[in-house]
Each structure stands twice: as structure tokens, then as C-alpha cells.
Image (cartoon, grey):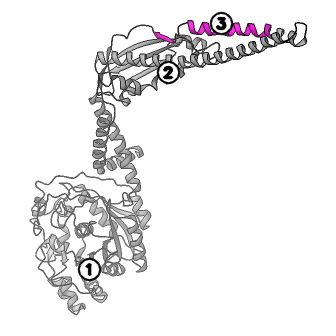
């Protein structure tokens, strides 16, 4: 079960961040197509070059030629090759030559494994080109330029050797001349004569050896190596990654990158994402977990879709809300939040409807006077209400008059926001309304403005018997919930629990979708014209006529359904649907 919940959690993360996946896939596909080496056809020709040890080699007695060093030397001659072949192949560049030429030493890998030495005295040249002739020309020219460079290197060393031997020979000839002069100028029985004669006998063999070495060097041809054969017939091959494979690789890399980016984004996102986070920030249990809106769960689901899971969830929430608090009956409830557009009105209206259906008389007060969501939802925009009451004396008599004039919709008495400009909220006026509501055995449900940004929300929360905080997943920030908790503690508000709104971040309505007007009451619902004690019987099995869908419910035609997210975990008591705006079942009510 835990694994299923975890998979579902990541599934929602991935679905919410679909745009990250799309961007990652497009980016990775472009990267794979443009930057990965694409497939190309080429022809490869080879030449093997036999290395003959010479004075130009730096090796050992057992390995007179260092093949690996010679391979590096061969790869360093690109300038000469390009200069020689640029007339035939104008497109040839040094970078292209370096990329396509391969020079390998110790081609006899079997001997290398057995002896653990590189002593084959063979270099393999191979060149890849777009045409067979170009492959042949470039591999032959590369091998020939290397042979010339090797010959020149050996020739310079031979010339230097001959120069040194010649200098030594000149020194010996000079010494011989000196000793012969001593012989001529001294008697044969003199010491000088005898010593000079000894020195001559030693010098003469050295002179003969030097002359022999010079003769051998000058007479023998200089052989530094040669091609073992002509260039091989080019073989057709291909390199790189085929385009379809690059696209598939890009898609896979994009999916992986998108998954990592989505999870990282979720971890760094400080907005509410779960009931556990909300409980930790507010210090109260989550009593309602509102799933996304569906066709069977419109804004007034408790009234127009009573047999649905959403309506039943609101009734469970109402049962929890009506439970006595500290031994006292709850007579007033405030539904508030941290900011706008978090679903407070949806929760307040459906909670009021569910309480009414449980048998209590309900007074719904549109206290969010800057929004007028309740007025728009029930078509009471021009009706007198809270603003008009606050502009009066706002005493008990005025409260009785306001409640007497308050219209009844769907079995609940509604005190709308009212007409005219807003005036400061009077604590005495709120107390008078609550007193008259209690006098008439009514439970008051306040649709309050966000308590974090408007003082009205804090004032009402301070006097209500129970306060519920609505937090919108993906919208409400956890820092705002912490600040709201502190503000409510400062006014000693009795915060009972929280309600999670899981509605989509995006609007569920097409652009330009207008208001649908007032809510109509299903046929046979008592209390439409006046507050009736039987209003809570709405939806009971004993009614004469089944409820009919209101224009609010009908307005959902043509609106794309959103996914229902209905996770209920302890201590969650209700899973409640919500929407985006006040005027339509598929828009969230602020």
C-alpha cells in the first residue's frame, strides 16, 4: 500500500511538471541530433610501413626502434601533408587530416601479448575519406611524408657523424705529421725519437679505423624503411550514430532529465503539496482533503450531486465540524486562508449546505466583502447584506432586520456581502449577528477574506467558535501558513483544523467563459422562499420530486474534466471537490 501511495505521489509530480518533460525531451533530441556524431559513410585505406633501425632512432639494444614514438612523429607531420595535397583536395584541413588519419604501432598484438614488448618494427597507416581515391591518396601521402621525414632525420644524424669522424681524422693526421717531424729532427738512438716512434705505431691503427668507418658510411645507402605494400583497396564503412537512434537516445535522455528535474523541482518547491506538510506547519489536523473538480462533483456538489462521493465527503466534514468543542456546542464557524484563490468560498458554501442537510438551521455570511463570491454564486449581487448592516447601527434590532430580509437558497439563509462601499468591520456588529443567529437556533458559517492579508479575517476568526484554514496545493506557500498560524494565535482564534484544496493550478474554463448567473433550487426543495425548518430535508428519500440539476451544474457542458485526486489518510475526514471561480461549477470560488 505504501509503495502504491509513493508511486502515486511521483505520478502526480510528473503529471504536474509535464512541461519540464516536454522541454527536456526537445532539448535532448536537439542535443543528440546536432552534437552527437551523426552517421556518415566513409572509405578506409591502409598501408603498413616497415621500420629499419637507423642512427636516427632512439632505442635499446633489444628494441632499436621505438614504434610508439615513431607513431607520434608520424601524426605530427600534418602541415606537410596538407600543404602537399591542398591543390588536389582544397577542402582538406589539418583538423580533418588529424581526425581521419590513424597511425598504430605494434600491430602484431599476439607478439605483444606473449613478449609484453613492442618490437614489431611496423607502423600501420589508415585514412578515412568520403571517396576511395581520396582515402588512397591521403594514406600514401601520409606514409611518404613520414618516410621522407625519417630519411631526413637519419641523413642529418649521418652527416653529423661523418663530420665528427672527419674532424677526428684531421686531428690524427696532424698528430702524425708532428710525430714524423720529431723523427726527422732527432737521432735514431735518442729518447725523443723512440717515443715518437711508439706514438706513431699507436696512432696509425686509429687512423685506419676512422678511414674505414668513413668509407663504410659514405658507401652504404641510407635505409630507414619502406612501405610493405601499396595502399589497400578502400573498404566502405560507416561511423557515428544513425538519426533514428539519435532521436530515440534524445527521448530517453529527455525522460531521465525530466524525471530528475521534476523531482528536484518538487523538493525545492516550498508550496503546500501534502496534508502532512500542512499539519506540520499549522499544528492542527487536516480534516478535509479537497480533490480536483469533475463532472460529478461541481462547485455545489453537496446540493446538486448528493449521491456522489464529493457530497458524502462534505457531509463527513460537517459531522466533524458540529462535534462539541471543549464541551460547548459550535454555533459559529469561520473558513479562512492565507491568500486569495485558495477555495475558501467553495469549502464554506458546501460545508453550510452539508450542515443544513444534517438538520441544523444555517446562516451563511458573505464576509469576504472585497470578493463578493457568495453574492455572485447565488445571484444576490444587488441584494442588501453585510455592508448595509454595518452602515446601520449594527445592533441587535438591525441584526434581526438583516436576517429577516436575508434570502433563503438551497435551504440555508444567506446574508450576502451587500451593496455599496465597504466600511470597517465592527466587532459589536459581528457579535449582534451571532447573537440573533443563536437566538434563532442557527449556526453561522462565515466565508471570510484571507486572514493573512485582511484584518476582517482575523477579527472574525477571533470571535468564531471554530476556525478552518483552507490551503491550496501548489499555490499556498508553507511560510505563509506558518505566518498565518502566528497571526491566529495572536488573536486567540480557536483553529480546529485545515482543509486541503487539490484543485489544478490552471483554470478549468476556456478563456472568455462568462458567469452563469444565479443558482436555481431543485424542484421540491422546501425553504426556497423563506427559511423553513424542513430545509435540512433537501435530498431526503421522502421528497416528492427528485432534485434537478441547476444552471450551475449545466454550465459544465464543453468543459474538460480534470482528474479526481481522492486520497484520504488519517486524520483526514473528508475529501471535498473544489473549482476555480465563483460563477461556475468548474471554476474555483475564492
Q: Check disc 1 and report the residue beneath it.
A: 441
State the image quarter where residue 209 is shown: top right
Q: Which tag, 1 or 3, sits closer to the chain's start?
A: 3
Q: Callout 2: few (<14), some (14-19), or many (20+) C-alpha neighbours within 10 Å?
A: many
Q: Circle 2 sits in a helix, a strand or a loop, which is it?
A: helix
| Residue 525, x across and y down, in percent | 12, 68
- Between the C-alphas of marks 3 and 2, the distance is 35 Å
Q: Circle 1 sits in a helix, a strand or a loop, which is it?
A: loop
Which of the numbered marks, if any, corresponds to residue 212? 3
| Quarter of the image with the N terminus in it | top left
- Between the C-alphas of marks 1 and 3, the distance is 135 Å
Which of the numbered marks, if any, corresponds to residue 71? 2
Of the two numbered discs 2 and 1 in the rendering, the one whose residue sits closer to the viewer: 2
State the image quarter where residue 377 is shown: bottom left
| Residue 263, x across and y down, in percent | 38, 49
Q: Which residues are magenta?
A: 200-226
- Taking the spot 39% from the left edge, 14% from the top edge, the residue there is 46
497 shown above or below 388: above
Amino acid at each position: 500500500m505504501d509503495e502504491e501511495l509513493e508511486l502515486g505521489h511521483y505520478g502526480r509530480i510528473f503529471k504536474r511538471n509535464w512541461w519540464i518533460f516536454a522541454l527536456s525531451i526537445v532539448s535532448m533530441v536537439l542535443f543528440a541530433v546536432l552534437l552527437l556524431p551523426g552517421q556518415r559513410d566513409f572509405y578506409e585505406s591502409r598501408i603498413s610501413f616497415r621500420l629499419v633501425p637507423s642512427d636516427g632512432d632512439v632505442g635499446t639494444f633489444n628494441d632499436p626502434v621505438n614504434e610508439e614514438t615513431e607513431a607520434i612523429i608520424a601524426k605530427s607531420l600534418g602541415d606537410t601533408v596538407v600543404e602537399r595535397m591542398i591543390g588536389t583536395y582544397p577542402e582538406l584541413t589539418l583538423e580533418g587530416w588529424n581526425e581521419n588519419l590513424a597511425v598504430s604501432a605494434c600491430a602484431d598484438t599476439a607478439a605483444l601479448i606473449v613478449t609484453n614488448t613492442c618490437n614489431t618494427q611496423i607502423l600501420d597507416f589508415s585514412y578515412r575519406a568520403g571517396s576511395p581515391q581520396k582515402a588512397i591518396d591521403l594514406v600514401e601521402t601520409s606514409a611518404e611524408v613520414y618516410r621522407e621525414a625519417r630519411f631526413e632525420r637519419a641523413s642529418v644524424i649521418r652527416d653529423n657523424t661523418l663530420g665528427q669522424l672527419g674532424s677526428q681524422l684531421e686531428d690524427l693526421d696532424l698528430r702524425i705529421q708532428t710525430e714524423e717531424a720529431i723523427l726527422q729532427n732527432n737521432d735514431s738512438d735518442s729518447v725523443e725519437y723512440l717515443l715518437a716512434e711508439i706514438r706513431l705505431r699507436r696512432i696509425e691503427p686509429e687512423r685506419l679505423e676512422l678511414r674505414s668507418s668513413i668509407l663504410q658510411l659514405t658507401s652504404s645507402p641510407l635505409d630507414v624503411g619502406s612501405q610493405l605494400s601499396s595502399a589497400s583497396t578502400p573498404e566502405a564503412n560507416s561511423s557515428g550514430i544513425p538519426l533514428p537512434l539519435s532521436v530515440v537516445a534524445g527521448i530517453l535522455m529527455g525522460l531521465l532529465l525530466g524525471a530528475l528535474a521534476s523531482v528536484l523541482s518538487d523538493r525545492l518547491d516550498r508550496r503546500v503539496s501534502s496534508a502532512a506538510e500542512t499539519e506540520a506547519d499549522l499544528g492542527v489536523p487536516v480534516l478535509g482533503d479537497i480533490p480536483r473538480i469533475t463532472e460529478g462533483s461541481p462547485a455545489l456538489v453537496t446540493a446538486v450531486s448528493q449521491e456522489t462521493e464529493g457530497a458524502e465527503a462534505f457531509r463527513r466534514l460537517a459531522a466533524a465540524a458540529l462535534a462539541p468543542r471543549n464541551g460547548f456546542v459550535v454555533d459559529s464557524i469561520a473558513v479562512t486562508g492565507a491568500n486569495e484563490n485558495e477555495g475558501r468560498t467553495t469549502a464554506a458554501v458546501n460545508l453550510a449546505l452539508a450542515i443544513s442537510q444534517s438538520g441544523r438551521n444555517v446562516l451563511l455570511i458573505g464576509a469576504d466583502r472585497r470578493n463578493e463570491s457568495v453574492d455572485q454564486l447565488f445571484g444576490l449581487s444587488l441584494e442588501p447584506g453585510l455592508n448595509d448592516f454595518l452602515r446601520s447601527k449594527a445592533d441587535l434590532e438591525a441584526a434581526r432586520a438583516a436576517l429577516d430580509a436575508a434570502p433563503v437558497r438551497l435551504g440555508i439563509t444567506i446574508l450576502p456581502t451587500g451593496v455599496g462601499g465597504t466600511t470597517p468591520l465592527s466587532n459589536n456588529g459581528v457579535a449582534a449577528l451571532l447573537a440573533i443567529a443563536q437566538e434563532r437556533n442557527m449556526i453561522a458559517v462565515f466565508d471570510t477574506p484571507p486572514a493573512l492579508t485582511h484584518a476582517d479575517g482575523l477579527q472574525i476568526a477571533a470571535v468564531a467558535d471554530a476556525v478552518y484554514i483552507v490551503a491550496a496545493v501548489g499555490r499556498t506557500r508553507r511560510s505563509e501558513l506558518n505566518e498565518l498560524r502566528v497571526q491566529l494565535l495572536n488573536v486567540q482564534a480557536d483553529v480546529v483544523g485545515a482543509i486541503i484544496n487539490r484543485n489544478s493550478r490552471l483554470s478549468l474554463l476556456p478563456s472568455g467563459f462568462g458567469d452563469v448567473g444565479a443558482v436555481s433550487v431543485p424542484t421540491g426543495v422546501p425553504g426556497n422562499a423563506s427559511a423553513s425548518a424542513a430545509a435540512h430535508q433537501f435530498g431526503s428519500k421522502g421528497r416528492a420530486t427528485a432534485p434537478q440539476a441547476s444552471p450551475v451544474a449545466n454550465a459544465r457542458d464543453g468543459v474538460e474534466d480534470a482528474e479526481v485526486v481522492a486520497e484520504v489518510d488519517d486524520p483526514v475526514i473528508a475529501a471535498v471537490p473544489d473549482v476555480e471561480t465563483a460563477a461556475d461549477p468548474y471554476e474555483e470560488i475564492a
